[in-house]
Amino acid sequence: MASGPERFSVADLYALSELVATVWSSAADRDWSARAGTLEWTCARTADHAVDCVWAPAFFLASRKRDGYPDLGLDMGLGAGAEPGRLVQSLEMATRVLGAVVHDADPDVRTILFRRPEIMVAPPEDFPPRAATELILHAHDVCSGLRVPFEPPAALCRRLRDHTRAWPMWTVAWHGLGSSDDPWGDLLTGSGRGRQKPNPA
């Protein structure tokens, strides 16, 4: 499923989650009711969705389902008014759970990763970048709305970009991925976003 010599790993997901948690914690006193970048959602609502997007792949992989997402009736979201500290705690828990589920799964397992535009099954190694793509982009949205800098490491972004390049969100829903020396910029541009401009509060 992944292209290129490097894979985005569980360790990369932990590093990204720690970075997001640190930045969000440092901005806990900002206005989380502000719009998240160019989205209609607030920063709090967007952060809650981003955390849910880390929980979800853990359930996908744990379910071993191949024909659709598991129908568990679970809502792991904390709600649009969740405090930053609770969002960070939920993100840390979700990251640990996903990491544990990936490590527990046999590499030969194939489980649903996407259901649109058609069912796509994948091995365990594809679930950390599945979570990370949503997390990294929505962390950018939140930080844009809070007016705090967010610049993930270039090597981590390169592995995420190269691992997910052929996935449907880039090839069908979004704008495709570049191959520049600025992998974070490629991820932002490919998703229809732009680099955050300095705008002190």
Image (cartoon, rainbow, N blue to C red):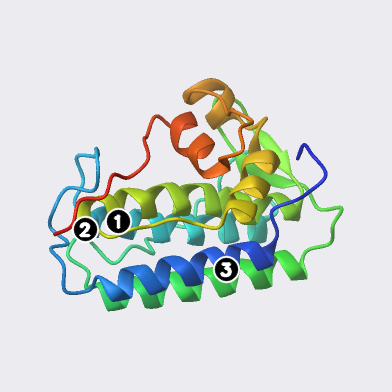
Q: Amino acid at mark 3?
A: Ala
Could you tell me residue 50's position as x and y percent?
39, 55
Q: In this picture, is 14 found above or below 186? A: below
- Within 10 angstroms of label 3, few (less than 14), some, or many (20 or more) residues? some
Identify the secondary structure beneath mark 1: helix
Q: Which residue was labeled with disc 1?
A: 143
Mark number displayed over residue 159: none
How far apart marks 3 and 1 lie (CA) works out to 17 Å
Identify the secondary structure beneath mark 2: helix
Quadrant position of residue 119: top right
Q: In this picture, is 128 found above or below 193? A: below
Q: Is residue 65 visible?
A: no
Labelled pair 1, 2 in contact (Cβ < 8 Å)? yes
- Within 10 angstroms of label 2, few (less than 14), some, or many (20 or more) residues? many
Which residue is more in the foreground, 29 or 147? 147
**Is 7 situated left or right of 80 in this image?**
right
Q: In this picture, is 85 found above or below 153? A: below
